[in-house]
Amino acid sequence: MIIGSIISGKERNEKSRTTHEVKNPFDGSTVATLALSTADDLNEAVEAAHKAFENKMKAMPAHERADILRKAARLLGEREDEFQQSITAESGKPVKQARKEVERSKQLLLYAAEEAKKIGGEVVPMDAAIGGDNRLGFVKKTPLGVVGAITPFNFPLNLSLHKLAPAIAAGNTIVFKPAEKTPVTGYKLVKLLHEAGMPEDALHLIIGTGSEIGTPLVEHEKVAKISFTGSVPVGKSIQKAAGFKKVTLELGSNSPNIVFEDADWKDAAERIVAGGFGYSGQTCISAQRIYVHRDIFDSFTDELVRLANNLKIGDPADASVDIGPMITEDEAKRAEEWVESALSKGAKAALKGERSGAMLPPVILTDVTDDMHVVQKEVFAPILAVIPFGTEDEAVRRANDSIYGLQAAVFTKNIDRAFRVADRIESGGVWINDASTYRQDNYPYGGVKQSGIGREGVKYAVDEMLELKFIGVKLDGGPPRV
Ligand code: NAD
């Protein structure tokens, strides 16, 4: 299959283009050949999206936008298998987890259909000001224009929809650049949204690398907003290059999970194993730093090891498999080096297998120190660092000792402690009695510190894709002053 940009509904996959192969991370087979977009394609896409905003989307009624989103949810429901297979083939995500991604994406589209119809405004009490009598003031929410959506490799359907669905709900037009490692699902998604009724000139797909096609999208003066999900270094460069545009950045993390001695710690271990090793830890809120009270440290670590040993490793297309390959062999080697480096500095492996190509079996490390990469940086691999603590203050201080702050977890049966710790943790979200990795798509989601700027979660993303416009009226007459 050769796939290329889709600009105003027309695919650009001529043989003369520079090509790039998308490989299945498990067996190295070719999933698709990409016909890469050029700077001219990008320019054409932005110009067309800009025109479509002025001529179409700006005036499209909310009920029509909601219809598009609802129809897209229905079409996705009819093509669940196709989308699951596409996610698994290009990202190496095991079937079980790819199915969940599709299921969540259907719900996300339906939330967006509902939000499209809730975009209102408010009346301003003008008479609060001296001189404001006999004036009427109200605030409307208006769409922004062209949204540039740039997405990472790890959730090619769900994270793309976290940008596309709110943009449609808000009445914007879109130029979408999926990750070059996993663009096939995004390509299918654009076609599905066109079929659902999104005007072809209002949603364009461009395919290519960040430097070649992402940067010009970020810099384009007719793009009103960049919505980006990806790594911290790229997020920083986007923030600099975007100039006056609005920017949402959903970046990385090294999520802390704190387990107190009074927790249902067997349940906590189960959730942390699922949350730390699911999709080989390649999730932005993957459980990574596990702080465990000293009194239960040994039993808890043994339980983690026992549960991790039960995970089935293998072909992600096999529905019984829990752990497939990492996205590339280079990434698996990078993660392995971080483990080796930690071991050379005194860490101990409670669990560790042999890497084979891109397949990295789960690793559980103890005796780590805060300066090790596996603690300090975003590990983005199936590696847990299990760290003992003595007091609540120590657990909170160490959890907060990070440049990141996306989502965290605290496990305890003590309700006062649960809320106290949740309040003290510096992150965009905290789960009590579930792992940091749990997410659903209707709550505000985003980071503090270097984990990002702004929030997604459909309602909140819609808000960030709207402009506030004040309209005031000076009325003649009105009731006499008392
Ligand atoms: P990445 O930053 O390498 O790439 C993300 C996207 O940015 C890709 O489409 C890439 O082509 C593009 N890009 C790269 N350089 C660019 C540039 N200079 N200008 C414009 N675009 C550019 O990330 P990745 O490896 O695909 O994904 C993994 C990262 O994403 C991890 O750090 C993870 O934590 C993060 N992530 C965050 C969230 C979240 O919601 N906070 C969710 C998933 C992943």
Image (cartoon, rainbow, N blue to C red):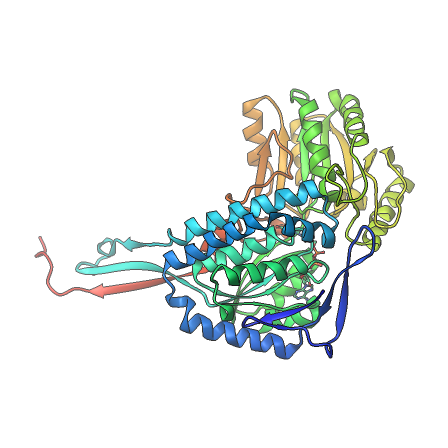
Placement of 304 over or under 281, stated as above or below: above
Residue 482's spot in the image, x, y percent? Answer: 8, 52
Q: How many marks?
A: 0
Q: Nearer the viewer, residue 398 or 51?
A: 51
Q: Is residue 415 above or below residue 429?
A: above
Residue 272 in the figure: left or right of residue 63? right
45 relative to 339, above or below: below
Q: Quadrant of residue 37?
A: bottom right
Q: Residue at x 73, y 52 (%)?
A: 89
**Residue 391 appears in view:** yes
Image-quadrant location for residue 430:
top right
Q: Position of residue 255 (x, y in %)?
A: 68, 41
Q: Looking at the figure, which quarter contains the N terminus?
A: bottom right
Q: At 32% from the left edge and 62% from the top edge, which residue is drawn?
A: 470
- Quadrant containing ligand 1: bottom right
Q: Is residue 150 left or right of residue 140?
A: right
Residue at left offset 62%, top offset 66%: 240
Q: Residue 291, relative to residue 33: is it above or below?
A: above
Q: Is residue 401 in view?
A: no
Residue toward you, 322 or 217: 322
Instruction: Provide residue 201's location: percent of width, then percent of height.
Output: 50, 71
Q: Identify which residue is drawn at 70% across, 35% down.
A: 274
**In the figure, is residue 13 to the left or right of 249?**
right
Q: Position of residue 254 (x, y in %)?
A: 70, 44
